[in-house]
Image: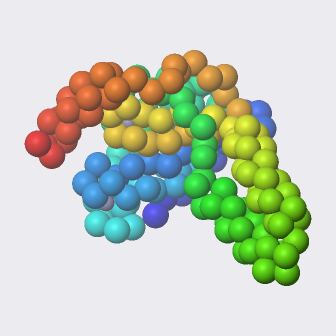
Amino acid sequence: MVERKERFKGFNGSPVQILAKCPKCDAGLPVDGAETAATIRCGRCGHETPLTITDQVRGDLAVDRCPVCQGADFYTRKDFDPTIGLTVVIAGAATSAAFYWFGLDLVAYAILASAALIDLLVYSRLKDVTVCYRCHSEFRGRYRRGAAAFDLHAADVLEQEYERKIGRR
Ligand SMILES: [Zn+2]
Ligand SMILES: [Zn+2]
C-alpha cells in the first residue's frame, strides 16, 4: 500500500514506474515515481520500507539513487516477460500440429517459423529496464539509460553488502 500524499508537479510525461523490492521478503511493490510517498508497506509481510525518491527519479530524468536501499549502482536489462514469448510459441505449435495432422507439413513448418519470428520481434521491441544491484528494485520510464549491462562480480559484491546491511546474512 502506498501512502498517498501530494503528487509531484512538474515532471514531463508519464511518471517512472518503480517496482520496489521489500527488504524483508523480496515481494515486488509497485510504486508510482510521481508519488511523494514516504513509506511503502509490504502487502505480503507488512514490513514498512522508507522511500527516498530523488528529483531525478521522480522527474523521469535518470535513475541516480535507489529509493529503497539508497544504492547508486544499477544495471540495464531487457524488460523481458517470458510468458508473452511462451504463449506465442505454444499457440504456434498447437496450430502447426493441427496442420501436420492433416498432412500439410509445409504449412505446419511455416507457422512454427513465424511463431519464432514473432518471438524475435517481441524481444527486439522490448524496452530496457533498470535494476538496482543491491535490492533488485526495478525502474521503468523514459529517462536516459546510464547503467551498463549486468556484471556478475558487481552483483556479488553489492548484494552481499546490502544483505549484511539489512541483516539477512
Ligand atoms: Zn515484505
Ligand atoms: Zn536498491
Residue at 82%, 54% in the rendered image: 114
Q: Quadrant of the C terminus?
A: top left
Q: Position of residue 49 (x, y in %)?
A: 33, 50
Q: Position of residue 65 (x, y in %)?
A: 45, 27
Residue at 51%, 19% in the rendered image: 148
Q: Is residue 9 visible?
A: no
Q: Quadrant of ligand 2?
A: top left
Q: Nearer the viewer, residue 112 or 150?
A: 112
Against 49, is 139 above or below?
A: above
Apparent side of residue 25 relative to residue 65 in the rendered image (left or right): left
Q: Is residue 148 visible?
A: yes
Q: Quadrant of residue 13?
A: top right
Q: Quadrant of residue 150?
A: top left
Q: Residue furthest front?
A: 103
Q: Nearer the viewer, residue 12 or 90?
A: 90
Q: Nearer the viewer, residue 34 or 105?
A: 105
Residue at 78%, 48% in the rendered image: 117
Q: Position of residue 30 (x, y in %)?
A: 52, 55
